[in-house]
Structure formats: C-alpha cells, structure tokens
Image: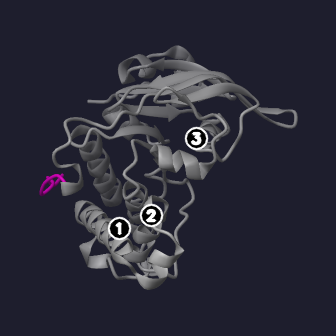
Amino acid sequence: MKSFRGQPRIYAGKKGPEPAELQVEHLSLRFGGVAALSDVSLSIATGELLAVIGPNGAGKTSLLNCLTGYYRPQEGKVHFNGEDVTHFSTYHLVRKGIGRTFQNIELFTGMTVLSNLLMARHVSSSYGFLNACFFLPRARREEVKSLEIVEEIIDFLEMQSIRKQLVGSLPYGLRKRVELGRALVLEPRLLVLDEPFAGMNLEEREDMVRFLVELNGSWGQTMILVEHDMSVVMSISDRIVALNFGKKLAEGDPLEIQDNPEVVQAYLGDRIDIE
C-alpha cells in the first residue's frame, strides 16, 4: 500500500482528536410489529474505530439511522459528548459533528466532484441572504475557507484528476470515494460509515482501507463502521459489536469476536484469521 504525502492542513496544530464520546443506552426501534432494534446499548470513545457487524436484517443500518437522525427510536437514549441528541434532526446532528456515508451512494450525479463536496459545506455557512446576493466580504471569507478544506480533502483522497469530472461519469469505486470526501468536508467529530467497501474491486477496497486507517491513526478520526467484509473489519477495528435480529449478541476486540461461538454460529461461519 502506498504511503500518504502528509496530513492535510485543516488538522494542523490540533493537539488531539475532536471530542466524540457517544453513548447509546437501551435503544429500541419498531416498525409496526417488527422490532428492528431491541435494547441495544454501546459506547464509543474519542479516536476509536468501532465496527458493527451482523447478518442481513440484524439491525445495523437501523442503528446508524437512529444515530444520525433518520429514525426516531421509541425507547432509549443517544448521548453525544454528554448531550441528549436522541431526537435531534439530521441537520442539527451534522452541526454537532456527526457525518456519515450511505450504503447506497447519495450524490448529485449531474454535478462535478468539486461541486458535490462544496455542497456539503452549506451547513457550515453562517452568512445570510444579502451577503450571498452581493458576495460581501463575510461570504467571500467563508467561501474561501470552504474551498481550502475541499481542496485538501481532494488531495488527501487522491482525487485531483477527477475533481472537475461529473460524478455520473465515474466508476462505482470512485463514487464511493467522493461520498467519503463529502462526509469529511463536514469536519465531523464522529464519522459514520455504512458499508463503505460494498461493490468495490480489490484495488478500490485497498485504497479505501488505506484512507480509513490513515484517518483513524494519523488524524485521530472517531469512526463507526458497518461492513460485511470481515477480513477488513478484523484487521482495522479497535472494537466490534455484533448484532443479530436487532439485539446485541457480543462485544469485544477482534480476537474475542472471532472466537465467540454465538457470533460464529450467527454470522461468521468459520473462524477468521486476522494475521
């Protein structure tokens, strides 16, 4: 795997990762008579990479949707940096510092890579209508800052050659990379990733793994990862939570999870070597 050229300037001078303490307490989510989540509790510490695994229908995406404001649980609480954010809207959660990618790519295919990333900076804009209409100094300053951040993310994700291409013309793997970039330009404290490797070929998967390892290791980016590629999950995660039928089945480090008989029976099948 290639090494990175260096750490983007947007993180230069920071003494450590941004606080991203998440506490999920007894979360339950129902759709009619179907329980998508039942009494799920977990936590994540600042700078940690937590993976959530489980078979199809285990409740993984439902959990992420509760954490990012798309679903409202009937029971339980979600605390982010000590604040109850259980019923916050997606917009407010982004403002609080929670960004995410999606299992199904959600990009503007008729716009360029650069425009897609700049669109994500909209939530960080504080200037009003008049500043925007006449492009007054305040608006210019914020636009310059947004462009600097976007260009640094483009450089980090090695997308210089496609920055002005239409997203709709890109292969699937590069679209997934653009979506990761769109989440990163939000400068999230907590990055939520829903199957970021799905549908990728081997080379694309290796590049994405490289980016996530660098984000977590060098940037101190806190992440929650939902993924079916167990070889990747076992090799990069600090801790793993296993779900099955909406309930937490097990929690521990990769070695504990791969040897847990309940997890093996429910999902893994055979023991996975992580060397």
Looking at the picture, does residue 126 appear above or below residue 103? below
Do the residues under discs 2 and 1 have CB atoms within 8 angstroms?
Answer: yes
Which quadrant would residue 207 be assigned to in this image?
bottom left
Do the residues under discs 3 and 2 have CB atoms within 8 angstroms?
Answer: no
Q: Is residue 112 left or right of residue 216?
A: right
Label 3 crowding class (10 Å Cα cut-off): few <14, some 14-19, many 20+? many
- Point out the tag, 3 or 2, that comes first from the N-terminus: 3
Q: Amino acid at mark 2?
A: Ser
Assign the C terminus to one quadrant of the image. top left
Q: Nearer the viewer, mark 3 or mark 2?
A: 2
Q: Is residue 220 left or right of residue 261?
A: left
Mark 1 lies on residue: 142
Mark 3 lies on residue: 64
Q: Is residue 6 magenta?
A: yes
Looking at the picture, does residue 6 appear above or below residue 244? below
Q: Distance from label 3 to label 2 (Cα)? A: 26 Å
Helix, strand or loop at disc 2? loop
- Residue 197 seen in render: yes
Helix, strand or loop at disc 3? helix
Q: Residue at x 18, y 56 (%)?
A: 9
Prevalent SS, magenta region: loop
Helix, strand or loop at disc 1? helix
Q: Residue at x 37, y 55 (%)?
A: 184
Q: Position of residue 31 (x, y in %)?
A: 81, 39
Mark 2 lies on residue: 125
Q: Amino acid at mark 1?
A: Glu
Q: Which residues are magenta?
A: 1-8
